[in-house]
Amino acid sequence: MQVSLTPSKSQTRQVQIHLAERSYAIVIGCDLLDDPATFEGLPRASQALIVSNGTVAPLYAERLQAALKPHYPKIHLSILPDGEAYKTWESLNLIFDALLAKGCDRKTVVFALGGGVVGDMAGFAAASYMRGVPFVQVPTTLLAQVDSSVGGKTAINHPLGKNMIGAFYQPLRVVCDLDTLRTLPKRELSAGLAEVIKYGPIADTAFLTWIEMHLDDLMGCDKDALAYAVKRSCEIKAQVVGQDEREAGLRAILNFGHTFGHAIEAGLGYGKWLHGEAVGCGMVMAATLSQYLGLVEPGWVQQFRGVIEKAGLPVVGPTLDAQDNAARYLELMRVDKKAEAGEIKFVLIDGPGQAVVRGAPDELVRRVVDDCCH
C-alpha cells in the first residue's frame, strides 16, 4: 500500500466527525499552527484562553497566540505542570483560576495546546466552566492527534482509577499540525504509535500491514508516513464515534489494550509508564487473552507482538505485587469503566480486524498476567 497523502500546506486534509449539531472537522497538515486561516469560522469572543504545559508552551504558545490574534482581542495563557501525574483536581483548578481571574464569560474559547493530558483537562474545564464554553483541540503529540483529542472524552485521574471523573464534551475543531511532531522525544513518539497500531487489529487489517511495513518511516518522523497514519487513524475513530458517541457499545472497541494498560498505569503510579507504553503492553496481554479464549491463532499473536516491540514499546508487563501479581491486576481492572457489576470487560480480537467486548474467567486472566509479566 502506498502513502496517499502529501503533507504540504496546500494538501491539508480534513476528517469529519458526524454528530449532528456537534459535528466538527479534524484538520491535518503542516504549517497550520501559525496560520490565522486555520482558526477562521470559530465562535467570535472578546477573550480566548490557551491551556498548555511547561514543556509545550515555550515551543508553540507564542505562535498560536499570534495566529489567534486576528480573531480574539485578548488571549490568555494557563500553563500546567507536565505529566500524567498532574492530571488532577489541583491542576484542573489552575484552569478555572485563570478563567475566573481574567473575567472570562461563557463565549470565551478554550484552546488545548499539548498532549493528551492537556487536552483532557482543558476539555473537562471547558465542559464545566459556566456549564460549558467552546473549546478547540490543538494536539502536539502523536498520541493526542490520533486518539485523545478526537471524540470528546475529557477527564482527570483518581488514585483508584484512570479517567474516572470527566465528561463527554466535543471540541469545535481539532487541528493536527504535523510539524509539532518534530519536537517529540523518541519515547513519546513510540507511545503515540501504540494508539495508531491499535486501529489495525480492531478495524483494518490492511492498515496494520501498512504500519508494519512503514514502522521505520514512522519512527523516523517521515512526514508522508505520519500524515497517512494520522489521517487513517482519525478516519477509523470518526466512524466509530459517529455511531456511538457516549460509548454505549461499539466505541468501547477503541479501548483495545486499555483495560490491562490502565491497571499498569494505576498500579505503578501515574507517569512511571507513559500511557501509550501501558497500552502497547496491554494490547499484547489482550491479544494473548484472545488466543487463550480461542479467538485468534498463536501465530497472529506472535506477529502482532513483534509489531509492538519494533515500535519501541514494552511487551512484558510489570510486577505490581510480588505476592500475587495477578490478583493486583484483577483488583485494579475491576475499577475499569467497562466493568459491569464487578465483572471485567475486555476488548478482545475476534479474528484479525474484528473486536469484541466480553468477559473472561479469572483463571484465564491470571494465566495471561503470569505469562506476560516478569
Image (spheres, grey):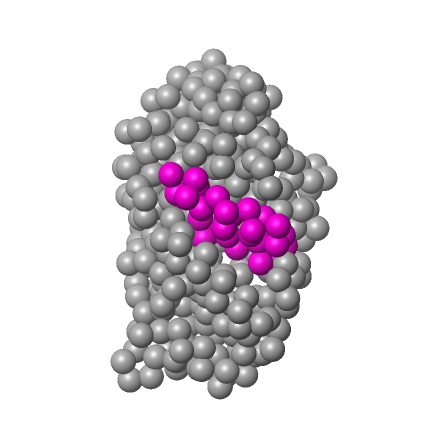
> What residue sits 49% from the left and 17% below the top?
36
Asked if 124 appears above or below 59 in the picture, the reply is below
Where is residue 96 shown, x and y percent of the image? Answer: 39, 40
Where is residue 141 shown, x and y percent of the image? Answer: 41, 40
Where residue 322 sits, quadrant-wise, is: bottom left
> What residue sits 30% from the left and 63% below the top?
269
Q: Is residue 330 within the magenta segment?
A: no
Q: Nearer the viewer, residue 352 or 124?
A: 352
Q: Nearer the viewer, residue 256 or 5?
A: 5
Where is residue 176 shown, x and y percent of the image? Answer: 49, 33
How many marks are shown on the rendered structure? 0
Q: Quadrant of the N terminus?
A: top right
Asked if 40 appears above or below 196 in the picture, the reply is above
Q: Which residues are magenta?
A: 193-220
Q: Nearer the viewer, residue 156 or 319?
A: 319
Q: Is residue 123 among what the camera can see? A: no
Task: From the viewer's perspective, tell me whether residue 188 is left or right of residue 354.
Answer: left
> What residue sits 33% from the left and 34% below the top?
183
Q: Is residue 204 within the magenta segment?
A: yes
Asked if 90 appears above or below 282 in the picture, the reply is above
> What residue sits 67% from the left and 46% below the top?
239
Q: Nearer the viewer, residue 13 or 3?
A: 3
Task: From the viewer's perspective, tell me whether residue 102 is left or right of residue 204.
Answer: left
Q: Main secondary structure of the magenta part?
A: helix
Q: Quadrant of the C terminus?
A: bottom left
Where residue 320 sits, quadrant-wise, is: bottom left
Q: Is residue 308 among what the camera can see? A: yes
Where is residue 194 shown, x and y percent of the image? Answer: 45, 53
